[in-house]
Image (spheres, helix red, strand yellow):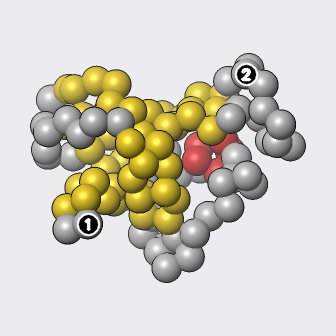
Amino acid sequence: METYDLSQITAAEFKALTGGPVVIHFAENFSLPATIAAVSELNGYTPLERSSFSVEFQTNGDHRVFAQGIFRVVHPNGKYLDIFLVPIAQDPLGTRYEAVFS
């Protein structure tokens, strides 16, 4: 597997994947299917060349809520991100988690 460069990834890249599948690894031997539910551009400060943004991930079919922390999010192409996710809501589909890129 290959990792994405967090300093280079942009909101536009995630917007192109909205609705698409990912897998979130919450523990060494436990992962859940999820989708990229929403991408929002933010006006916050960032020392990087790209602007700040947030991404919401929606787990599918599992209503457990995992505490905030760093988890591996894997795209079907095999690339992954180790990002800090915060649970923000539960709904009939599962749980929503948010990652902020600043």
* Disc 2 element: loop
Q: Is residue 60 above or below residue 40?
A: below
Q: Which residue is mark 2?
A: 44
Q: Looking at this view, is 85 or 18 the one in front?
A: 85
The picture places residue 50, in percent across and down from the top left corner, at 80, 41
Mark 2 surroundings: few (<14), some (14-19) or many (≥20) residues within 10 A:
few
Q: Is residue 9 above or below residue 100?
A: below
Rendered residue at 64%/33% (across/down)? 53
Q: Looking at this view, is 98 or 83 the one in front?
A: 83
The picture places residue 15, in percent across and down from the top left corner, at 59, 43
Q: Residue furthest bottom?
A: 1
Alpha carbon separation for disc pair 1 and 2: 33 Å
Rendered residue at 26%/44% (across/down)? 59
Q: Is residue 93 above or below residue 76?
A: above
Mark 1 surroundings: few (<14), some (14-19) or many (≥20) residues within 10 A:
few
Q: Is residue 56 visible in the rendered structure shown here?
A: no
* Disc 1 element: loop
Q: Looking at this view, is 91 or 29 the one in front?
A: 29
Q: Is residue 10 visible in the rendered structure shown here?
A: yes
The picture places residue 33, in percent across and down from the top left corner, at 26, 56
Quadrant (top left/top right/bottom left/bottom right) for the C terminus: top right
Rendered residue at 82%/42% (across/down)? 48
Rendered residue at 70%/47% (across/down)? 10
Q: Earlier in the sequence, mark 1 or mark 2?
A: 1
Amino acid on which the number 1 mark rests in the picture:
Glu
Q: Is residue 13 above or below residue 2?
A: above
Amino acid on which the number 2 mark rests in the picture:
Gly
Q: Which residue is mark 1?
A: 28
Q: Specify the quadrant of the image occupied by residue 98.
A: top left
